[in-house]
Image: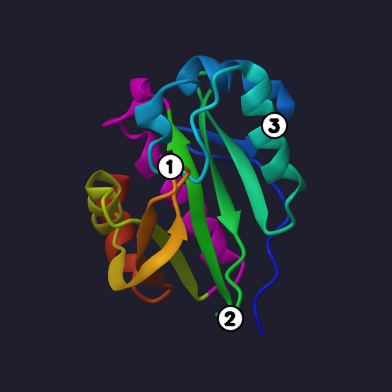
Amino acid sequence: MTAKLPAPVVLENDVVRLEPLTLDHVPDLFAAGGGDEEVWRWLPVRAPLSEQELAKVARGLMDDDRHIPFAVVVSGQAVGWTTYCDVPGFDESIEIGWTWYGRAVWRTAVNTGCKLLLIDHAFGLGYNRVLLKTDHLNLRSQNAIKRIGGLHEGTLRRHRKRPDGTWRDTVYFGILEEEWPQHRPRLQR
């Protein structure tokens, strides 16, 4: 049977704090990446052009029982979000997705810090597999997923439409519980 999504919690390390997403995060989030087409390029919605539009997207995630969204907080400011997602049809699996960060934290330790927290927490709760997926054209994301230990599992062609109406092929990566210990120490450094 498919595993139940975990309860929202606060996760923290020396790089980042993940806290349940609320509408109070929206002003910081909009300042970090609102209206930035490149930040939102690979997400399933267009770049929000106002705090109200961003709040509507955030509210949608918070109200969706298939997602557990977290605000990504650095030095007291929300700089993006990430979610745990349900993975129907896969026993004891969880997905990390719907992730975005403002440009100011690109190429920093933020993504690695988030993934360490989320993957450790998932395996600590008894999940046996973490799924990560991205658009086949999003090479930056694919490289980041490979760097944290994700193994390419396949590509679903014409998986879903992008906001502009074109078709997205989705590249799937997985990390199994027994694989994680070989990657974790390298990422901690």
State the quadrant of the N terminus: bottom right
The residue beneath circle 2 is 89
Q: Pointer 2 and pointer 3: residues touching (CB < 8 Å)?
A: no
**Residue 150 among magenta residues:** no
Q: Residue 97: give x, y in percent of width and height.
A: 49, 52
Secondary structure of the residue carrying numbered label 3: helix
Q: CA distance from mark 1 to mark 2?
A: 29 Å
Secondary structure of the residue carrying numbered label 2: loop
Q: Residue at x 39, y 43 (%)?
A: 42
Indicate whether 61 appears above or below 15.
below
Residue 6 is labelled as: none
Indicate whether 131 appears above or below 109.
below
Residue 56 is labelled as: 3
How busy is the neighbourhood of tag 3: few (under 14 within 10 Å), some, or many (20 plus)?
A: some
Secondary structure of the residue carrying numbered label 1: loop
- Viewer-proximal residue, 157 or 5? 157
The residue beneath circle 1 is 164
Q: Nearer the viewer, mark 3 or mark 1?
A: 1
How busy is the neighbourhood of tag 1: few (under 14 within 10 Å), some, or many (20 plus)?
A: few
Inspect the image, locate mark 3, and give the three-letter code of the amino acid beneath it. Answer: Lys
**Residue 115 among magenta residues:** yes
Q: Residue 144: give x, y in percent of width and height.
A: 27, 49
Stretch of the chain drawn in magenta: 102-127
How busy is the neighbourhood of tag 2: few (under 14 within 10 Å), some, or many (20 plus)?
A: few
Q: Residue 179: give x, y in percent of width and height.
A: 33, 73
In the shown orientation, is residue 28 left or right of residue 129? right
Q: Is residue 156 visible?
A: yes
Q: CA distance from mark 3 to mark 1?
A: 19 Å
Inspect the image, locate mark 2, and give the three-letter code of the amino acid beneath it. Answer: Gly
Q: Pointer 1 and pointer 2: residues touching (CB < 8 Å)?
A: no
Q: Residue at x 31, y 64 (%)?
A: 150
